[in-house]
Image: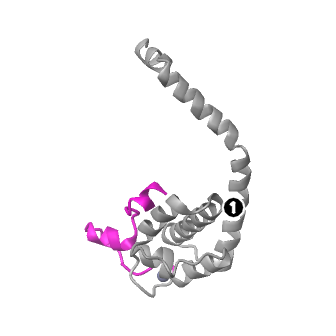
Amino acid sequence: MWRFCRNSLPVRNLLRGRGVLVSVGCSLCVGDIEHVNHLFLDCQFAQDCWSEVNLNYNDREEEYAHEWFLNMLSKAPNDVLIRIATVLWDIWFVRNKRVFKNRLMSAAFGIQWSRKQVEEWQIANKKYGSVQVYGEQEIQLITNGDLHRRITSN
Ligand SMILES: [Zn+2]
């Protein structure tokens, strides 16, 4: 997700730009050049995934997929963000299965997998409180100097 936000995911278009000898065709549809916007928004596989989770990005003002996502991060409610992140991850997962395992997955299978992910994320979200507590403990460690003491005592 971090690399997506930085627009540095190693899609084929970017790899070719760095001198890696790969075909630039989309891994999923072979219908267009595999750049981030195509893979995550314009590809038929991506469109099937987005419509499945009832998300519409066609009226976006941002030119690039990562800019759109960054803007959504600042304004969309958490449930929408989870759906977006899930689909992004799902598309990347299916794409990599195709590239590295030569496994062709239908959109239906990918979407099914995505739904399972959403359920797992929701379960993880319920546990968020404990993560939060852990974060607060870490901040406390830093602010009262315990972390510094622990590091320098070794
Ligand atoms: Zn495609």
Q: Residue 31: where, in percent of width, then height? A: 45, 88
Choose between 133 and 14: the one closer to the eye: 133
Q: Does the magenta stretch include residue 10?
A: yes
Amino acid type shown at disc 1: Val
Q: Residue tagged by mark 1?
A: 118
Q: Residue 86: where, in percent of width, then height? A: 61, 63
Q: In this view, does 55 lie above or below 18?
A: below
Q: State which quadrant residue 38 falls in.
A: bottom left
Q: State which quadrant residue 34 falls in.
A: bottom left
Q: Quick check: 36 left or right of 73?
A: left
Quadrant holding the C terminus: top left
Q: Is the magenta stretch mostly helix, strand or loop?
A: loop
Residue drawn at point x = 58 percent, y = 66 percent: 84
Choose between 32 and 79: the one closer to the eye: 79
Q: State which region is magenta.
A: 1-28
Choose between 101 and 151: the one closer to the eye: 151
Q: Residue 65: where, in percent of width, then height? A: 44, 71
Residue drawn at point x = 61 percent, y = 76 percent: 49
